[in-house]
Amino acid sequence: MAEVEISHLFKTYSGTTAPATRDITLTVADGEFLVLLGPSGCGKTTLLRMIAGLELPDSGTVRIGGADVTYRPPRERNLSMVFQSYAVFPHKKVVDNIGFGLAMRKTDKAVIREKVEWAAGLLRLEDYLDRYPAQLSGGQRQRVAVARAIVMEPDVLLMDEPLSNLDALLRLEFRAELKKLLTELGTTCVYVTHDQVEALSLGERVAVMKDGEIVQSGPPLDVYDSPASVFVGGFIGSPPMNFLDGTLRRTGDRAYVEVGAQRMTAPAAWSRLPEGPVRVGIRAETITAHRAEHDGGLRAVAEVAEPLGSTTLVTALIGDQRLKVQVPPEFPVDPGDELWLKPRPERTRCYDPESGRVMTDA
């Protein structure tokens, strides 16, 4: 295990003008599970490949365990990588796939067998060691790829969207197994994904990337509850955060937001903000729906209701603005129903409509 220190990494690919990464500085603590999250093309895989030594930066440094490895080849970094594709050898049995890296190091055969059996036991592959990859399911092949990585006992484990080729049920099952495994091993891990559910459920810390930069980093629930920008709030969450455009007003020491001709109660701390246009961020699960007019609520008209079993997701119109609200299944909603929606003030966030940056964390 080792700490990973990334300092001022820049990378621009030939034939492009926009940098793939822009001045990225980041530290991954020894034993930490960090998730790099962002849309396709944001630079997260480029950053991972620079840590691995598969790409060289234009400038900046990468340190692993205190040693500068920026220009060292991958074999000198004592790390393992799990790719999006399973990348297992189809002509080799599972036992030989898992032990391949050790064999390349010319490790003693008895030691290889011992370590392969250890890794296979952790990933429930003991009964498949004599099979070929074609005889395995997709989930089992991905377990082989992870076993091959951990058997090397790396200082750092890098994972590039390792679950994206699995179907939804397998992805859910393997996600839980992977979290349990990495918690037990305590290996420093940097995990890349564009799936925000994966990021929130797996990581001890999430670093959200956009256009080659890290725009927010922190514990998953902090990033979810207090997005630093409209981009982060709109990217994280299923459904993503709602945004309502309005005007912040004050009456004495109290604040409210005008949304069209209606007023929405604002947190007390917003009374310290300047009056003017704002964008209010509201999570769907922090809104309560009522049938009758409710103090501090907003009149809305239901447009679509989507029963999801444990909850119903309602899309509603407030004037010409849409937002989504979660209601319990015993609260039936039909298109055209009039609703009064009341957000919890302490869970709302205020953003500058021009910059998209948060104005308060109240």
Image: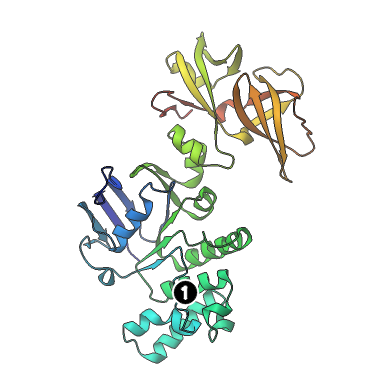
> Does the rendering let one see residue 253?
no
When the figure is inspected, residue 362 is found, relative to residue 206, above or below; the finding is above
Give the class, few, some or many, for how many residues have Cα within 10 Å of label 1's Cα (few <14, many ≥20): many
| Circle 1 SS class | helix
When asked about the image quadrant of residue 314, the answer is top right
Judged left or right of residue 65, residue 100 is: right
Mark 1: which amino acid? Ala
**Quarter of the rendering occupied by the N terminus:** bottom left
**How did the renderer colour the structure?**
rainbow
Judged left or right of residue 136, residue 99 is: left
Report the residue marked by disc 1: 147
For the view shown, which residue lies furthest in the front direction? Answer: 15
Residue 150 place in picture, x, y as percent: 43, 72
When the figure is inspected, residue 248 is found, relative to residue 73, above or below; the finding is above
Q: How many marks?
A: 1
Residue 31 place in picture, x, y as percent: 39, 61
